[in-house]
Image (tube, rainbow, N blue to C red):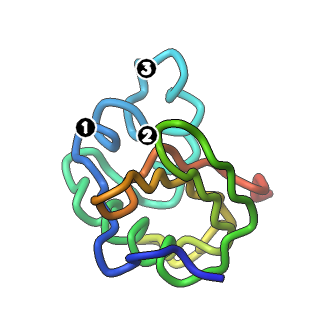
Amino acid sequence: MRLPNADRLQVDREKITDYLLCASHPDGQAKAEFFTRFGFRPEQWEVFAEALRKHGGSYSIVKKVESPYGTRYAVDGPLASPDGRNPRVRSVWMHEPGAGPRLITAYPLEVPT
């Protein structure tokens, strides 16, 4: 099964620049280090946002959790990266009633050698 409303996936600029690609964020620092190794850059955050939207819309859901805030979905698969190495990652999306799924986080499934 794929994400519902995959044509409406939302990736906020702040989620990328202030978290996933922020080397000074306490929780995002390791993620920033990982994703920048594959050519993603905060100043080109739209490239990362588009790669995450394609990732979320291209692969099957591996986990689904219902909550009072909506349904959280996890999607695993290769992430198209600027350097072409395409690491396997998990993207996590929250689908709130009346809105398209919104990116919550993304993280590596494997660390390349």
Residue 76 falls in image quadrant? bottom right
Which secondary structure lies at badge 3? loop
Q: Which quarter of the rendered picture does the C terminus lie within? A: bottom right
Residue located beneath label 3 in the image: 25
Q: Which quarter of the rendered picture does the N terminus lie within? A: bottom right
Q: Look at label 3 and name its amino acid.
A: His
Measured as percent of width and height from the top left, residue 35 is found at 51, 50
How many numbered discs?
A: 3
Instruction: Left or right? Give the position of 54 relative to 87.
Output: left
Eyeballing the image, is 15 above or below 71? above
Q: Look at label 1 and name its amino acid.
A: Glu
Which secondary structure lies at badge 2? helix
Of pointers 1 and 3, the one earlier in the residue sequence: 1
Residue 2 falls in image quadrant? bottom right
Measured as percent of width and height from the top left, residue 91 is found at 57, 57
Tell me the distance, in whole angstroms, between the alpha carbons under discs 2 and 3.
8 Å
Measured as percent of width and height from the top left, residue 73 is found at 60, 58
Tell me the distance, in whole angstroms, between the alpha carbons under discs 1 and 2.
9 Å
Which secondary structure lies at badge 1? helix
Of pointers 1 and 2, the one earlier in the residue sequence: 1
**Residue 14, which numbered label?**
1
**Residue 101, which numbered label?**
none
Residue at the spot 51% in from the left edge and 44% down from the top edge: 105
Residue located beneath label 2 in the image: 20
